[in-house]
Amino acid sequence: MDDATGQATFEQMMALEPHGADTYVGVGPRYPWGGLYGGQIVAQSLRAAGLTVEPEYLPHSLHAYFIRPGDHTEPIRFEVDRIRNGRSFVTRRVVARQSIGAIFNLAASFHVVEDEADVQSATLSPEAGSPDDHLSDGWSHVFDRRPVGDMRRSDAGLSRAWLRMVEPVADDPLLRACAISYVSDDLPTDGAIALHPDRKLVREEGDWERTFMNASLDHAIWFHRTVDPAEWHLHELRGHNLTGARGLAIGEVFSQAGVHAATVVQEVLLRRVRR
């Protein structure tokens, strides 16, 4: 555990221990709301998958489902299934388990680097400014966050913030993809809330939990370009749809130089609290 915080560092969370064939065990800290943070489980599952893949194959996408809330007092068991080893692509499935049963399921694909066209159409919005233009409101000891405006009350249905890992991340494409995965679970719920017609009824920050119940349902990331997650990156999530208590947020991750690093999609459960 980190001496300053009494919490597991990102490096410690990524140091999964082998526990039999293609099986790894990890731990996580208790987060402010209790239990585990979904981004941690995504990152650790991708790490477990990557430990069974040759280093020339880099993660290019993942698709995952959150099944049950995790318990921070228990270790997490990551069971990897080697679905396919191809010449260009490798596919893995990971199930994360605790004593209650499966808590998370992930499919990840890895791809060898190919010397082909590199075209980017998504662009960094100048309205986001720079991280120095905004104040930090980070809740995590692992990463810092600087929101761009009010992420939950945007009339444009936008949730935007500059995010960076607090500690350096090793120059390893897999670990850097894991770090992007870790922070990618922070904003999607706000993108969905930004669509809700009752969002402006909330007057104080503490009212959010008394007004809305929310939980991550499923998560997807496409990794386009390797970047350093210890540098500031803009995460911009747009509320895309809200129906049947399910909200969908879609967005991009950009470096300060405007490099489109990743695309993130998440569906969240979002319900009004009934009193």
Image: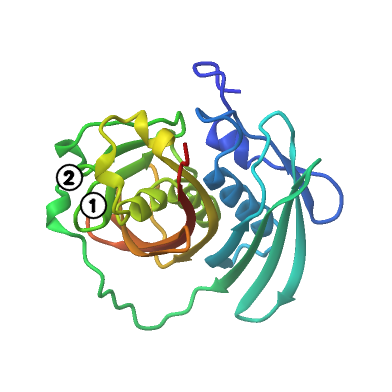
In the depicted structure, whether residue 187 falls above or below residue 111: above
Distance from the alpha carbon under mark 2 to that under mark 1: 7 Å
Numbered badge on residue 88: none
In screen coordinates, is 234 left or right of 110? left
Image x and y of residue 224, in percent:
41, 68
Q: Write the residue at 67% across / 48% down.
A: 68
Asked if the residue at tag 1 contacts the one at tag 2, i.e. Cβ–Cβ closer than 8 Å, the answer is: yes
Relative side of 233 to 32, left or right: left
Q: Give me the residue at 17% from left, 59% from top.
A: 125
Which secondary structure lies at badge 1? Answer: loop
Of discs 2 and 1, which sits in the foreground? 2
* Label 2 or label 1, whichever comes before in sequence order: 2
Residue visible at 36% across and 28% down in the picture = 206
How many other residues sit within 10 Å of disc 1, few (<14), some (14-19) or many (≥20)?
Answer: some
Q: Position of residue 96 (x, y in %)?
A: 72, 51
Judging by the rendered image, the residue that carries numbered circle 2 is: 130
Instruction: Name the residue beneath numbered marker 1.
Output: 256
The reply, left or right, for residue 122 in relation to residue 29 is left
What amino acid is found at the position of numbered circle 1 in the picture?
Gln
Q: From this view, report whether residue 199 is shown above or below residue 109.
A: above
Residue 71, image x and y in percent? 68, 35
Name the quarter where the N terminus is drawn.
Answer: top right
